[in-house]
Amino acid sequence: MYYKSTRGGLNSISSAEAIKMGIAPDGGLFVPERLVKFSLDQINSLVELDYRERAVYILKEYLTDYSYDEIVECVNNAYSSDKFENPEIAPVIKLNENVSILELWHGPTCAFKDMALQILPWFLIKAVRKTNDDSEIVILVATSGDTGKAALEGFKDVGGTKIIVFYPQDGVSEVQKMQMVTQEGGNVFVVGVEGNFDDAQSGVKAIFTNKSLIEKMEKSNYKFSSANSINWGRLVPQIVYYFSSYADLVKEGEIKTGDKVNFVVPTGNFGNILAAYYAKEMGLPVNKLICASNENNVLTEFINTRVYNKNRKFVKTISPSMDILISSNLERLLYELTGHDSDVLNKWMKELADEGVYSIDIATGRKITELFWAGYSNEEETLKTIECIYDEYKYVVDPHTAVAIDVYDKYVISTGDITKTVIASTASPFKFNESVAKAILGEDKIRGKSEFELLKVLSDECSLKIPKGLRDLDKKTTLHNNFCSKSAMMAEVEKILKI
Ligand SMILES: *Cc1c(COP(=O)(O)O)cnc(C)c1O
């Protein structure tokens, strides 16, 4: 299997090279030259396998320059019982006759990013060796909260790598901040940046492309790579759990192999739902992919009107991991739907960069609405959904998952579709406990309490155990005290790497 860039400016490369580079030098994203197809018999053969075996079955088709044993090793390192608290790794919970919840947050940081960021480091160090490269890999991350911690956990003490995470001082929750500043590991660095996520993100982008810094890095045998969701090594592990959830529904007798299901995905950068699209194109029987947004509903508008317009107010919501106005992975979908037309893609992406807006042609727009249905949930609706789901099922959902459930309800009202549906649950309710406690217990009972006190309150109220990754977080020692201004980020990297 070979990979090319969506922007068309590159010869085909192996998966190891694509994973090592992260983003293509022409600014595009790496995509497989063709999609692997699975027959219903093959899908049926997944039913009796466990999560790790299912992962190997699928990953080996895309990472063909890795040996079978190497893939097994990566999978076993990533999805182990000391990393994931639930032995099923990504369990499927039946909510009612029509709806099941795919819980993707049993990893060390309690959000779905662990599903990919626990395995990416293993892919990456093997990729470096495979391409006869002896440089030390430096992972640079700008985070709005979840990615940073998940990447730190994934890369901590992985030989041959260092990881530097920049988080916006004003942009992350107390829990998220504590998770990062208490991070252990000999190769991890965490720095607070004055400003918001965009400041941190543009700072990191500037570092990645600074020629003189890259030269200095090379002299010291360092090379940058990215752990953001544009890296193919982060996308491909996400395909696995869509197949896995389908196999679980077959196993439980909820569906027969061949029956179609809907997937609902709370969406920000379009990575998670893109993996669901790939699963469908690979032969998984899918009816509709339902794209759920919060008030930053740029994708809802795009899917319904063919116009992508990021020129709008950025809203800070209670589902912050979806507070995003540029959904990078959409580029991959457009590449597939235009029949790999890099020329038209270059034009749209240039319009997006220059004007902040582009519109796609009618034929491509029609393909999108055949595959996807899109909606959004506002803050009030999201809180109401958390409350209703708890009242009705005694099941606790985080705000991102609640966005998905609310949008699914809107989908059913609008279409009357009763196809079995799987809703991707992307975070533990404990991770965003303030909003969850507010929705379930009311404003009065949470007033004046810190996020750490609320963990206990929520745990008692709902009779749920606080996940390992969040327990006693406030008692941990702060290990990272570094702060810098946006303009000092590059100097900070030089200081950390001693170059
Ligand atoms: C990152 C994240 C999302 C959005 O996923 P994308 O792949 O960026 O669309 C949704 N929910 C949570 C909790 C996340 O951390």
Image: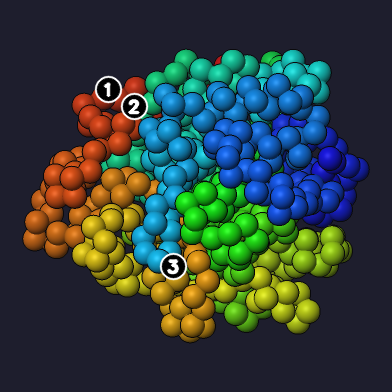
Question: Mark 3 vs mark 2: which is more N-terminal?
Answer: 3
Residue sitting at 76 percent across and 31 percent down? 16
Q: Would residue 167 appear left or right of 17 to someone viewing this image?
A: left
Residue sitting at 61 percent across and 74 percent down? 303
Residue 493 visible? The answer is no
Pointer 2: residues within 10 angstroms few (<14), some, or many (20+)?
Answer: some
Which element type, helix, strand or loop, lies under badge 1? loop
Please name the amino acid that badge 2 sits on: Thr
Which quadrant does the N terminus fall into?
Answer: top right
* Mark seen at residue 477: 1
* Mark seen at residue 111: none
Question: Real-space Cα distance between discs 1 and 2?
Answer: 6 Å
- The nearer-to-camera label among 3 and 2 is 3
Residue 122 percent across, percent down from the top left = 62, 25
Labels 1 & 2 near each other (Cβ < 8 A): yes
* Mark seen at residue 98: 3
Labels 1 & 3 near each other (Cβ < 8 A): no
Please name the amino acid that badge 1 sits on: Thr
Residue 231 percent across, percent down from the top left = 66, 42
Query: In terms of image quadrants, where is residue 405?
Result: bottom left
Residue where numbered disc 2 is placed: 182
Residue sitting at 44 percent across and 45 percent down? 91
Query: In terms of image quadrants, where is residue 235?
Result: top right
Labels 3 & 2 near each other (Cβ < 8 A): no
Residue 76 visible? The answer is yes
Question: Real-space Cα distance between discs 3 and 2?
Answer: 41 Å
| Residue at mark 3: C-beta within 8 A of ligand 1 | no
- Give the answer, above or below, for where 428 lies relative to 132: below
Question: Mark 1 vs mark 2: which is more N-terminal?
Answer: 2
